[in-house]
Image (spheres, rainbow, N blue to C red):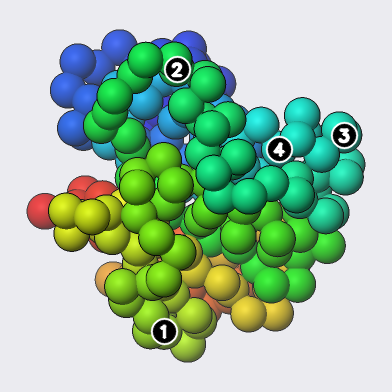
Amino acid sequence: MTLSLGMTPVPRHDDSARVYVTELSAGGGMTAVLMATYPEKFAAGGVVAGLPYGCAQAAGSPWVCMSAGGGQSPRQWGDRVRAARPGYGGPWPRLTVLHGTADAKAGPVNMTGLRDQWTDVHGADRTPDVSDTVAGFPHQVYRSPGGAPVVETYGITGMAHGQPVDPGSGAEQCGTAGAHLLDAGLCAAYRLGFVWGLGD
């Protein structure tokens, strides 16, 4: 089940282990907001070309945040999420981030901020437990101290601001290139569904 941002921000489905949220750009920022403020409602979230939670406040401006990031340490980033739900002890949603390395609207520094923020929230370090390539792009997975994958990143080399698609009819393909739907040879929707086990 996926939450559309056009609906109420709190899903009505009672099984939080099967509720996911994802969006692009400002919607990616909203995905981080939903994960931070309603962590018990979501199993995982996917931020595509978005921002860490609290980035605009950290940077003093949304425009500074988008271009230069929020300038926070991993602990400071994590504290912003924890402050959104004081006293909440988990579990926290798993995060997947897809971000273009040539994104001039929301700089790739924001993928680093998201990684730092959510590895800190999960108590994971910033040394990837998996570092490989998917469809030729750098892919990293960070595990919690208990060994569960909690943060995953895809750096889409050379991609500008948008949602990566891979037009075609193959099992791992999706989409049609257009405004903010960029033919990257990797389908973000497929990757998120695969990680979330939606094909099972």
Q: Which residue is mark 4?
A: 55
Q: Residues within 10 Å of mark 3 (few under 14, many from 20)?
A: few
Secondary structure at numbered mark 2 = loop
State the quadrant of the N terminus. top left
Q: Which residue is mark 3?
A: 61
Q: Name the kind of residue labelled 3 in the image.
A: Ser
Q: Which residue is located at x 17 percent, y 23 percent?
A: 15
Say whether disc 3 or disc 1 marks the residue closer to the N-terminus.
3
Specify whether 59 is left or right of 185. right
Q: CA distance from mark 2 to mark 3?
A: 23 Å
Q: Name the kind of residue labelled 2 in the image.
A: Arg
Q: Which residue is located at x 86 percent, y 33 percent?
A: 60
The answer to whether residue 19 is visible is no
Per the rendering, the mark at residue 133 is 1
> Which numbered disc, 3 or 1, marks the residue closer to the eye?
3
Q: Which residue is mark 2?
A: 85
Q: Residue 152 at what x, y percent from top left?
A: 40, 61
